[in-house]
Amino acid sequence: MNTIRKVALLSGIALGALGTPALAQDVAPAPPQAAPAATDTGEIIVTAQRRAEKVTEVPISITVASAAQLERQQINTVNDLARIAPSLEIQAAPGQNTGGGGSIRGIGTQTFSPGAVASVGVVVDQVSQGNANISDLFDIARVEVLKGPQGTLFGLTTSAGVINITTNKPDFTQFSARLRTELSDAGTAGSKYGNQVIQGLVNVPIAANAGLRVSGVANLRQGVNRNATTGDLNDTDRYSVRGRFLWEPTDRVTVNLNGDYAHSSIENGGDFFTFVKTGGPGPFLGGAGYDPVGITDRLASCGVTPGVGNRNYCTDESYTGKAENYGGSLQVDYAADPFTLTSITAYRKSTETGLGASSNVFRADPLELQVHNAAVNRDLSLFTQEFRISSAAGQPIEYTVGAFYSNQKQTRDPETVDVTLIPAPGVTIPIVSNTTPQLTIRDESLAFFGQLTGHVTDQFRLIGGVRYTTDRLSLDTFDTTGVVTDKTVLNTEKWSWRLGAQYDLTARAMAYATVSRGFKGGQIAVPTGATPYVVLPEIPTSYEAGVKATLFGSWVADLSVFYMKIDNFQAQQCTVDANAIISCDQKNIDGVKTRGAEINFFGNVTRNFSLNTGFIFAKATYPNGFIGTDGTDIGGGQLAYSPRYKFTLSGQYDIPLGERFGGFVSVDTVWKSRIRYEANSVEDTTYRPHWMVGGRIGVKTADDRYSVAVFVRNAFNVHEPSLMQSDFPYNGASNIGAIYGPQSYRNVGISLDAKF
């Protein structure tokens, strides 16, 4: 079925629903606009089930972060969200974190495969981001981390969970503006790198029923990596802007028009591999055997000392890359008593280009084995259309039904990797040159879904949901003349479902139990120099039970136990081949499991004290007998990138300082158990249990209009890596490489905030 026919079919469904007569009593429809983070009584409101509800009434394990929490924890990027929820981990390595959503309870998608989709979906203002996800977070009202398969109600494939982001809506009543900054400089007050974040917004009432809100951010970073040859830190600069127009032409119609644009540039290579351990010989010299000058000595000659936390590298080359990401959406809600009709049309596009000279990926000195990535040119577009019909809240049967269509297309120009050996100045020995062909990947999906809640009694409710998804994934490979040389297609039709029950224990406590079957689309892997192959869809079956309660007025407790088994878990295993090229193999693994328990507390304990904390035990394991990349049996061992235990805590205490001023102290800390970064038994590519501690101390005016604070992140300079790789860069040698990011080093600075 072509795109035009599918959109027409969805439109027909919506028009048919408009013609459906109102069936019953005169009741208020469900609010179409996302509600604020809390009601006047302090109740936290979420849209986890595509309607505004109290978080304590939703039968899903949820961690909620308000705007205040996001700001005090300095959650400026999607990667930073790993600090707000114990269940959430986000892989920050460049090109590795498909879709941007990371993993939940140990289950996620870490892959370089161009045809992959994320296990954890990212949704912004009810729009699925796909693989064209935003990077920077600013002017955010609320973030909800939803655990477990969410495929019944959310678009695209969300087999492990959803990060549901809601931005601030325009205010019709008054003009307002705001300016926030977080400023740090490399070498000042112990800061290991520099970062300047400048956020601004303007809210303009246009009429009594219309308003416009425009916000933007500049996020400029110097480091963390440093070129020892020049002494320069790598620069990463990102700029983003968003506009949101809200119009309520009648008391029944609400129109939301959103648009955003982001531009990023990277100088000197960005975050990539550095050496943390060496011990093997130098590069292989063909018939002459190994180079007698070891890699450790070569690194020392240009000022690099391998070790945990080493961020220095040597190269006399440069690399510049840039990326653009933009999109827009139109949401129209119509209150047709006793239900609400919703239409959301969205388009997103992202491009990535690499310019200038090729880069010395391995960060060795110029007289080393060098791996050069030639210029890249990648383009991705995503169109989505969703129609929903939602019943009014508080009815004997509450329901949401709808249809969702998505069409994602990605193109990649040929990309070349050259390996050369330079044993002496002016002597260049070519080792290998690999070129991936031009690729076009298309992923087209159509789904119909529905979920209902039946009120058996005032305290007891039953839940049922179903989703039917048809998905077509295709990959075209082209030769140098632009002719298709290979076409690989994967057609999938799957049912997802959810069943459960919930019971109100008291007026302030609820218990629930659910079982659900999820779905994550397949992949078409593109190995270097080999024929593309299919990686089958991932099918999780999840069991969850939990209790939610409101304590101390508005502090929420969320306790859950869970068990999930995944058929055809999509994994990636990377090794270094004989030519010093990292080769990654995508594959299905049957029998992967995650099980454990999680507890979260979030909200305000008292008027002056907010506390968000949580702890998770998640035993996410490979199946028995599973053989790792080093040939050892790691069956029953913890999945890569997944700590078994994790603790998070963020809180702020406000201190009155007379009638005009106040002080505040906040803390932000995370503890993780040991993490493995490869699917093997190599101890050197695991990272020890560790604490990451930060906080702020400052003063503000009594009306919260102005504030100034001093902050520190990663106060003890703990070097948690983003990624680690053994046999690096020589297969069989005892060398270890790591990628470090801004989470890996101390950052100290000052923050300023002014509201007008």
Image (spheres, grey):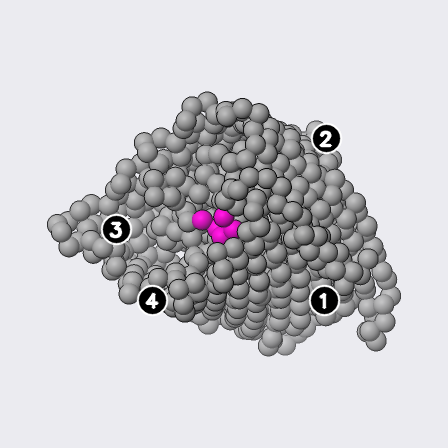
* Precedes in sequence: disc 4 or disc 1: 4
Q: Earlier in the sequence, mark 1 or mark 2?
A: 1
Q: Secondary structure at mark 1?
A: strand
Query: Where is residue 360 shown, x and y percent of the image?
Result: 59, 67
Type of the residue with mark 2: Gly
Q: Which mark is residue 411?
A: 1
Q: Residues within 10 Å of mark 1 (few under 14, many from 20)?
A: some
Is there a contact, CB below 8 Å, between mark 1 and mark 3? no
Residue type at tag 4: Phe
Q: Is residue 406 left or right of residue 89?
A: right
User: Residue tagged by mark 3?
Assistant: 697
Separation of residues labelled 1 and 3 (CA atoms): 48 Å
Give coordinates of residue 501: x percent, y percent: 58, 27
> Residue at image x 70%, y 63%?
410
What distance separates the C-alpha of mark 2 from that of mark 3?
Answer: 51 Å
Q: Main secondary structure of the magenta part?
A: loop
Going from N to C along the chain, the mark reached first, 4 or 2, is: 4
Question: Who comes first in sequence, dot 2 or dot 3?
Answer: 2
The magenta stretch is: 31-35
Residue 625, label in figure? 2
Residue corresponding to mark 4: 175
- Percent from the top left, x then y, of residue 353? 62, 71
Give 36 or 253, whichever is nearer the viewer.
253
Alpha carbon distance from label 1 to label 2: 38 Å
Q: Quadrant of residue 542?
A: top right
Q: Name the front one of labels 1 and 2.
A: 1
Task: Report the mark closest to the observer, 4 or 1.
Answer: 4
In the rendered image, the quadrant that contains the C terminus is bottom left
